[in-house]
Amino acid sequence: MKQSIKTGFSFGLTSGIITTLGLMVGLHSGTQSQLAVIGGILTIAIADAFSDALGIHISEESRNTLGAQEIWEATLTTFATKFIVALSFVVPVVLLPLAAAIGVSILWGLLLLAALSIHVANVQRILRWKVVMEHLLIAGVVVVLTHYVGQWIADTLR
């Protein structure tokens, strides 16, 4: 796989998981609203996917190491990956009660992140468990923090 596509895929996947889970958990704990969570996911899938894609595009341009085609490959791969990953979190929210959907979504996101982490560790020939634990710990911190921020906002504004 070309490096430009690896860059877009790994960035889009990671950002799609972390950003969407953080938003979902925060909105759930703050509003308990299925509509708010779905709206948040769709917003991430569109606006944040474009934002991340442009961020990768400008970052790669500023590095000045890739040609125009490779920059666009990274850009489009970032957008497509983040868009698809973010949208995948809508499925449990539509099909399950909201609290269960949040749990399933967290599990889904951690599974995707663990799979990517194992791949990264294999490519770098480093201990898989260390990479997986590091990445899952960061995701866990995001989930816990956004839960408590959502709860604090709900408690403060009610």
Image (cartoon, rainbow, N blue to C red):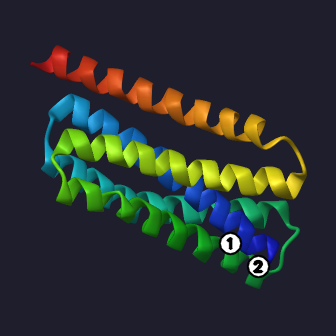
Query: On the image, numbered disc 2 is attached to which residue?
Result: 70
The image shows a total of numbered marks equal to 2
Amino acid identity at mark 1: Ala
> Is residue 22 shown to the viewer in this render?
yes
Q: Is residue 84 left or right of residue 68?
A: left
- Position of residue 78 relative to residue 40, above or below, is below
Extreme-left residue of the structure: 158
Query: On the image, numbered disc 1 is attached to which residue?
Result: 74
Residue at image position (64%, 57%) is 11
Quadrant of the snapshot with the N terminus: bottom right
Q: Position of residue 38 (x, y in %)?
A: 23, 55
- Position of residue 15 relative to residue 22, above or below, is below
> Is residue 57 shown to the viewer in this render?
no
Q: Position of residue 64 (x, y in %)?
A: 85, 67
The answer to whether mark 1 and mark 2 are in CB contact below 8 A is yes
Extreme-bottom residue of the structure: 69
State the residue in front, 56 or 151: 151
